[in-house]
Every structure is written in structure tokens, then in C-alpha cells.
Image (cartoon, coloured by chain):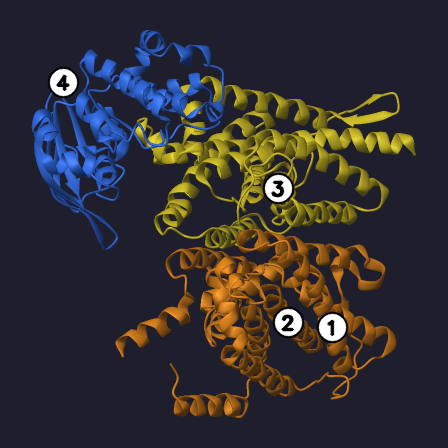
Chain colours: A yellow, B orange, C blue
Amino acid sequence: MVELLLNAVINGILLGGVLALLAFGLNLIFGVVKIIHLAYGQCVMLGMYLIYTFVDLLGIPLIPACLLTLPLTGALGVALQWLVINPLLRAKANPLTQLLALAGLIIVFENLAQVIWGADLRGVKVPLPLINFGPIFLRASNLIAFFGALLTLLSLYLFLHKTYLGLAIRSTAQNVDSARLMGINPGLIYYTTMAAGGILTGIIAAFFSPIYAVHPHFGGSFTMMAFIIVVLGGMGSMLGGFIGAFIIGIVTSVTAVLTSTEMGEIVALVIFISVILVRPQGLLGIKISR
Amino acid sequence: MFSKLSLIILFAIIALFPHLFPSPYLIHIATLIFIWSFITTAWSYMGRFGLVSLGHGAFLGLGAYTSSLLFNHYGLTPWIGLLLGGLMAVLFAIIIGYACFRFGVIGDYFALLTLALGQVVALTIIAFRDITGGSLGFTLKSKGTSLLYLQSEEKIHFYYLSLGFLILAMLVWKWIDRSKMQKALRAIGEDEIAASTLGIGIIRYKMIITMISAFMTAVGAVLYAQYVTYLNPFTLSGVVASLEIAFKAILGGMFSLWGPTVGTALIIALEEYIRVSYGGKFVGFSQIIYGAALVLLIIFLPKGIYGTLQQFFQRKK
Amino acid sequence: MLEIKSLNVYYGEFQALFEVSLRVLEGETVITVGPNGAGKSTLLKTISGLFRPRSGTITFLGKRIDGLPAHRIVEMGIAQVPEGGWLFPQLTVLENLKVGSYLKGSRREYAPTLKDIYRLFPILDERKKQVADTLSGGERQMLAIARSLMSRPKLILLDEPSSGLAPRVVSRVFEFVKQIKATGYAILMVEQNVRKALHLSDRAYLMESGRVHKEGVRQSFLDDPYIKKAYIGL
């Protein structure tokens, strides 16, 4: 029993790493473009489908396929900014309208996937070994994902804090008009952010591909998970998202092992609802007046 | 927008429709439109006042599953089942509604919260798969054509029944529109803080409208379950079902009486057209178009198709 | 170097500026005074590109800048210190200064410019790792002005630098403005503290209700009885 729990906790932590990436992307986009990207999980899904297409249908080996997918998912982010977000910003849509528009995108992406790739599960068959340390069994794919995620987070942190562009992005998030007065072009920053967010979905897709099979509704539970994390950690707080990811990763993993996968999700959803009710700014977020 | 005369003519056409065009397929589509219009109109009771719920799937699930499980296992007539299902939905609405309104959750946070709720109900239904059949759903026991058990082998019965329900939903809409509640909720929708200083019982009015919406949505779900005699958690609960309700209402225009019906009719007609013309494989296509159209519409026509037309005609006067 | 002719600016249907014309010559310090709501802030924000005029022209160093987006106007050499400073609250003092030299041209000069700024404002060097939100009012204003200098502008727009500050701090802020003026920058300043501002200025404009009511050299303002009574309180 203890071993089972231990395994669940460890795997939860490993999962938490990639969830932290997901939360980071959402927080970045929310902080800079000020939009709740409801269809983020679906973007990851599309990334996974692209990788599958490259590997299974075009015979490209896994790693080049992943690398090839990154600019494509980045371009998707840019396209979203251009076609959906810019019009929303121009029309000065209220947050609810933005939410609904992005929810509409969920329907578009899921059905796009269904039309192009069909409703069945599609997987990249890459056999990776199971490593064990005593009573703990770890999949190599999960380990790679975990360390890869940490590495990515570190790079993103360095980018945001040590480069001029990163500084410009952080400034735009804090006061967009003031950023303008510094010579920063907010439009360019939005595109950059959405491109970065897009590339991030490609990276996450790369880590997920050896672990999960993809289907048109795959994005759904991950988007929900990502939102739960972002709200728990506090919208806009990178550190909060990081911590939240591990909490949710562990809680879902343990609950799923003890009861069922659905219960795991239900527990996460209940946490989400409670946070919204009781402490909407989450653990580390900024207090938002409603 | 519709004068009394045109309403009468419209009603006459709809009433005589099955006799003029006795195509079971068209009657089926019309019935579906009536049932979902009933549900989307009930949704709009909340939506038009700023309480945009993306979790009405929860009420669908509670209503349909309560009634249908009681029927399948205990032979309870769906007429009572519908009341019980509605009651379950209302109880759920009371608990969640009170928590939300008490804690001042509004706008997009409210929408996200309801989204999670719809999903919780769906997951719960799936989790109890021994009773509910999980993601595969279950079928209602057949009782042939029976008014008592709200089933029929003649499509035309449900045509008129659901039409009746739709008219009821519209009458309730009108009743709400004329009541004191409407003014209060409008004020709340526009500026909650100002409204509260005027002494308007914010929580009370929000609760009432939520309860009405919940009850009727659940009833609509029972109607649907009885018509298709099959339940499954993806159609009758969860994220997608909830979003579809909201979208149909918003597309048509959630602030007007006919808006949700117009939106529902357009979407169902579009889906059917594509299914028929291109076969089931391309059902996804219709959804893509409808999702994209929705995104565009939400951005450019916040009052929906019907609402914008209504505004347009009013200006012409 | 800055020439504004017949500027009309609207907020929706409400007109804020009526046929405003104004000039700033190289190296000059020009101040605009007037009561609250006279449109002084609107004027500055229109020059820096945050607002678009409905009609009229703004020319800077011979080029038309009205209608250009704000970030391009900054590129051309105009820096604005808005009222309250508009610092980036969660960035440190150093980071705020660094953003000031975001423009490609200024980046090359970043290190030497930073040194100059620290000499002018030594307290910013002390507090360079401190988050901007935690500074006092006077320090914030100092940082805001310093930040605007990081882009080595040709014209500085100062919007009510003394607003919200204690009198002693206000004196210090004006000391800095004097130092900046001495370095040769052209300054267009909007101020409610007319007496102190006038002493710094070469020329002045009086704005009321969105219109320019008077223009003149410093002395003419100091001698004007209406201004003395209404704004200087003598």
C-alpha cells in the first residue's frame, strides 16, 4: 500500500512538472495579453497530432518530428493572435465575451482534429523502458518529461529576466501604456507572447507524445487541469502556477490510484470551485476586485 | 418584431406543419428544435441578466438521470420523475447559487465555476458506471406508446408535446420580463453595487432566477431523454453540452424572447444539413463552421443574429 | 523643435482641446499652467501618441508626428513622464531604468547613461535592487524622471511632477528639473504649482477649458495681474 502511494506521489510530481509548463504558458498569456486562453489544451492536442503525423505517416523519427512541430505550434499562436485576439481587443470585448470566443475555438479545434485524424486514439509508438529504484517504478518517458519541463522553465525564466525582450514583455504585462512610452510596441509583444505560448504547447506535446495517446477530446481534461492550477496558484503568478502544478499533480495522482481516474478529476475540480468561492486570488495571485 | 397577426400565422403554420409535410424526418428535426429551444430559452432566463452559465449540463444530467433511473428501476412515471429531476436541479442550484452569490462570484469567474460544475456532474455520472452505464449511457425501458410513461412510437406526439413545452417556456419568459424581478435583475446586471445600495435583494433575485432556469432545464432534459429513449453523459451533461446550450442562445441573441429559438433552429438545421449532404464523417465539419461562426459572431455581433435584426428593425421605425 | 498647430482632441463625443497651438524651441523650458481639467494632461498625452487628435498637426524636428503610435514617437526622441510616474510596480529600480533604454539606439549607450543617471540621482544607485512599488513618493518621481532620461531624448514632457508630493520633496524634484534643464534638454512641463514652475521656465502658456488663453515669456506671466491673483496667490 505504501509503495502504491509512494509511486502515486512520485508520478504525481513528475506529472506536475509538465503541468507547471502548461500553467506557465497560461499565466504568461493571461499576464501579458490579458486573455484567458481556454483553448490552450487543444493547442497541445494539435501539437501531438502533428508529431503523430510526422512520425507515423511521414516516417520522420521522433526527435526531429518534435523539433519540426515547434515552429508550427508557434505559428498557430501567432495566427490566433492575428485572427481572434486582435479583433477581440479591437472590439473592446468584455472578459466574458473573450471567454466565449475562446470556448468557440475549443469546438473548432476538437472538430478539426476529428475531421482530419478521425475519432480514434492516435499514438506515437515509442517503447521507453521502465526504470526502478527499489519499490518505485518510473517510466523513462515521465522522467524525461519532468526534467525537460524543469529545463524549459529555467530557460523561460532566464529569457524573461535577462533579456531586453523578456524585460519588455514583463513591462507590458505590468503597464501597457507605460511600456508604449518606453518605445515598446505592444502589438509586437502580444505576437511574441502568443508565439512563445504556442512553442510551449509544442514542447508540452513533445513530452506528452511518448506518454499519452491523443484523441479529439484530449485537450479538454488538460485545459481544465491547467485552469485549476492557474486559479489555485493565482492568475498571473508564475511561482503560484509552479506550486499549484505540483499540488494538483500529486493530489490527482494519489486520488486516482486510491479510487478512480474520474474521482481524481472530480477532486481537482472541487478544489477549483472552492478556490474560486473562497479565495479567488489563489495562493499567490494579485487580489482582483470584482 | 412580430405583430400579433404574424404570430398567429406562424403558429398556424407550425401547428399544421406535420399534416402538410408528413415527413417523419422533418418532424423529428422540428421536435429536436423545440426541445432544445425550450432548454436554451430556459438558459437565457439567467444569461440575459449577466449570469452566463457554462454549466447547464449539470442541470441536464441531474434532471434526465434522476427521472430515467427512477423509471428504469422503480417504474416511476416520468411525469413525476420530471418534477423530481427538476427538484434535484433546483437543490443543486440553491447550494451552488447561494455559495456563488454570497461570495460575490460574477462574470467570467462565475462562468468558469459553472464550467467546472457541469464537468463534475458528468464525471460523477461516469464514475457511478454500475448504475448509470458510465460513458456508454443506458436506454429507457420501452413502454410503447403511453402517455403515462411519456413515450411514444409516433413522432408526431412529441412534436406537439415539445411545442407545447416551448410555448410554456416563452410564456414564462414573458412573465419574468413583465415582473418586478426583471427590473431588479436588470439593475443588478448593470451595476451590482449601485443596485445593492438601493436595497434590492441581490442574492434573493439571483437565486430565484437560477432556480427557475435550473428547474426548466432539467425538465427539458427529461423531455429529451423520453424522446430519444437513450441517455449518455456527453449529450446530457459535461462541458460540451453546456457550451452548446450557451452558444445556441448567444448565437440567436440571448437578450430576446425568440433569440434562443432562432439560434437553436439555425444550428440544428445546419448540423442536419451537413450530416445529410456529406454523411456522418463530416459532422465534424459542421461543428467547425459553427464554432468559427460563433467566434466571429461573438466578436462582431454581441446581440446575436436575432437580436441584431431586432435592433435593426426597431431603428428603421 | 516642437510645433503644434490648431490641435483638436476628443474623448468620444466630448471635446477636450480646442484649436490648441504651441511651440517649444531647442533647449527651451516651456511650462503650461491652468486649472484642473484644462486639458493640459491631454495635450501631453496627445503629443506622446497615447491619444490621437481629430484634427490639427504636431511637428517634431520637421516631421509630422500626430497620429503616429506612441512607441514610434519615443523613437524620434520624445520622452514623457506621466502624472504619477507610471513605474512598472513589480520591476526593480534597475529594471525600470533598463526598460528606459529599450530602444535599439539607447541600448548601446546603456552603461554610460546609467552611470550619468546614478551621478544625478545617487539614491537610485543605493536602491537599485529594490522593487519600485516599495519606494517613497519622492523616490518614485525621481525614478520616473530618471527613466525617461535613459532613452537620451531630445524633448522631455513632464506631467505634473509635483503632484501628490510633500512640499520639501517638491523642492527637490524641481531641483532635478533645473539640473536637467542645465544639461540642455528641451522640456515641456505641465504644472499646477505655478510659482515654482514659472521660475524654471523660459516661456509659458495658460490653458483653461481646453483652450490656450495666454502665451508669453516668463516675465510677462510673472507681471500679469490675473495670473498673479488666480494662480500665484499674491
Residue at the (67%, 50%) spot, across then down: A273
Residue at left offset 37%, top offset 74% = B310
Q: Which residue does the image show at 71% across and 77% down from the upper left?
A: B226
Q: Where's residue A55, x and y in %?
A: 58, 33
Residue C137, image x and y in percent?
41, 26
Instruction: Find numbered disc 4 in the image and state the secondary structure of the residue it sits on.
Output: loop
| Residue matched to label 3 | A231
What is the CA distance from the residue labelled 2 to the residue labelled 3? 29 Å
Quarter-wise, where is residue A125 in the image? top right
Distance, label 2 to label 4, CA atoms, is 72 Å
**4 vs 3, front mark:** 4
- Asked if marks 2 and 4 touch (Cβ < 8 Å), the reply is no
Same chain for mark 2 and mark 4? The answer is no
> Can you tell which of label 2 and label 4 is closer to the viewer?
4
What's the CA distance linking mark 3 and mark 1?
Answer: 31 Å
Say the numbered circle drawn on residue B217: 2
Q: Which residue is mark 1?
A: B87
Protein chain holding label 3: A
The reply to whether discs 3 and 1 touch (Cβ–Cβ < 8 Å) is no
- Name which residue type carries label 2: Thr
Looking at the picture, which amino acid does disc 3 mark? Val
In this picture, residue C213 sits left or right of residue C13 = left
The crowd level at tag 1 (other Cα within 10 Å; few <14, some 14-19, many 20+) is many
**CA distance separating discs 4 and 1:** 78 Å
Query: What secondary structure is found at the residue carrying circle 1?
Result: helix
